[in-house]
Image: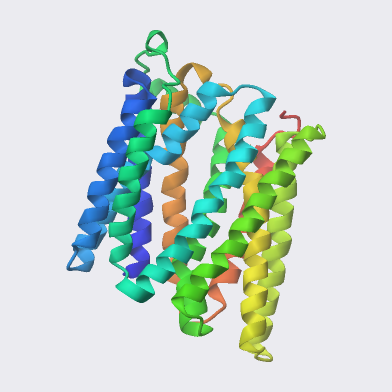
Amino acid sequence: MVEYTLTIYLFGFAIGTLFWGKLSDKFGRKPCILAGLVIFSLGCMGCYFSSSIEMLMISRLIQAFGGSIGSVLGQAVCRDAFHGPSLGKAYASIGSALALFPSLGPVIGGVIAENFGWSSIFLFLTGFTLILIAMVSIKLPETLPANNRKKTAILEVALSLMQDKRVIGLGCIVAACNGILFSYFAEGSFYFIDLLGLSPSMYGASFIMIGIATMLGGVFSKRLHNNQHSSTAIIKYGLAIMGFSAALFSMIAAFHHHILQLDTSVMVTISIVSQMCLSFGICMATSNALALALTDYKHCIGTASSLFGFFYYCLISLFTLGMGMLHNGTLLPMPLYFLTLSIFMLIVQKLMLRTDTA
């Protein structure tokens, strides 16, 4: 049930992405970002005061609905401000920067949970969000001028996206990459803390290494762009790295489970290094898939970002649900599931992405 709170969060995130993009096309990016942050903070307070798993799930849904502005409107702002090859480079830089907070979050969360209880994490998030609201109010410019705002027929855009094989393929890749990351967030605590004996703070500290690997993936991707490699080619490189890492991770986990149990410290090291390699490839694939996906939809980018985000966050929610259903108290499900998702992405890339895409 606790793992499913993440599935609920991702579902609320998907609903939010459908809502905020179209609204921002009409009213601008900045007011919608501020409204989303306020709703996110209310959801955090609901989580803090939750006295049952059901109340926690409802609060997580509200929290996710507001928090989804970070994805859909962050992308819309980026696409408003950058165009052409510079968009791919911008996403590579953003991918590196975005590695910072997901790596710091579990470290801070582990320390808070160990010393003050897990619910205090949501109190910390509320305070941090209030600071962010002040920063956005003062520092963030409006990237969609009033004369560029217009009503967009959401059904017409949705039908166009559904018929675009490249958009669907890129959405599946973004979803499966994030499915691996969120499944790691959901299953990793059981994997490392319950089965391998790490403390919550030590488990949280492992995310620093994963964050560094993600940042390096973004730096490497940007360097490949500078050396005239196409976004499609960089996606292929990232997927190949992920497939190899997941296969090796699965083989070692199977050997540990069925043949000879390795020392706990060895398994911890192998597991973290494997996840670092996966995260390196994920950053390469995701940043370029996001940059490529909606290049033909500049005229309705807010609505298109909403629909695209709704599509891949629904898939992420399903992928995370799958991880929860496979949980069986052993080390095997997580690496094998990551290998399955990696193979799925390689098949999608082969069948649905043109090799001549810039």
Return the residue found at the far right. Answer: 227
Residue 347 appears in the picture as rendered: no
Image quadrant in which you'd find residue 353: top right
Return the residue found at the far bottom. Answer: 260
Quick one: 299 or 99, which is closer to the camera?
99
Image quadrant in which you'd find residue 355: top right
Q: Where is residue 308 drawn, in percent x and y?
A: 47, 35
User: In the rendered view, would you say 131 is above or below 208?
Assistant: above
Q: Left or right: where does residue 166 sit relative to residue 30?
A: right
Report how many numbered discs are placed on residues in the image. 0
The residue that appears at 67% across and 65% down in the rendered structure is: 246
Instruction: Identify the image's colour scheme: rainbow, by chain, secondary structure or one colour.
Output: rainbow
Quick one: 230 or 206, which is closer to the camera?
206
Residue 133 appears in the picture as rendered: yes
Q: Where is residue 306 drawn, in percent x and y?
A: 41, 32
Q: Left or right: where does residue 91 sit relative to residue 145?
A: right
The residue that appears at 41% across and 13% down in the rendered structure is: 145
Q: In which quarter of the image is the C terminus?
A: top right
Q: Where is residue 227 drawn, in percent x and y?
A: 82, 35
Q: Left or right: where does residue 43 sit relative to residue 163?
A: left
Q: Left or right: where does residue 147 sit relative to residue 196?
A: left
Q: In which quarter of the image is the N terminus?
A: bottom left
Q: Where is residue 99 drawn, in percent x and y?
A: 56, 51
User: In the rendered view, would you say 57 is above or below 265?
Assistant: above
The residue that appears at 51% across and 73% down in the rendered structure is: 203
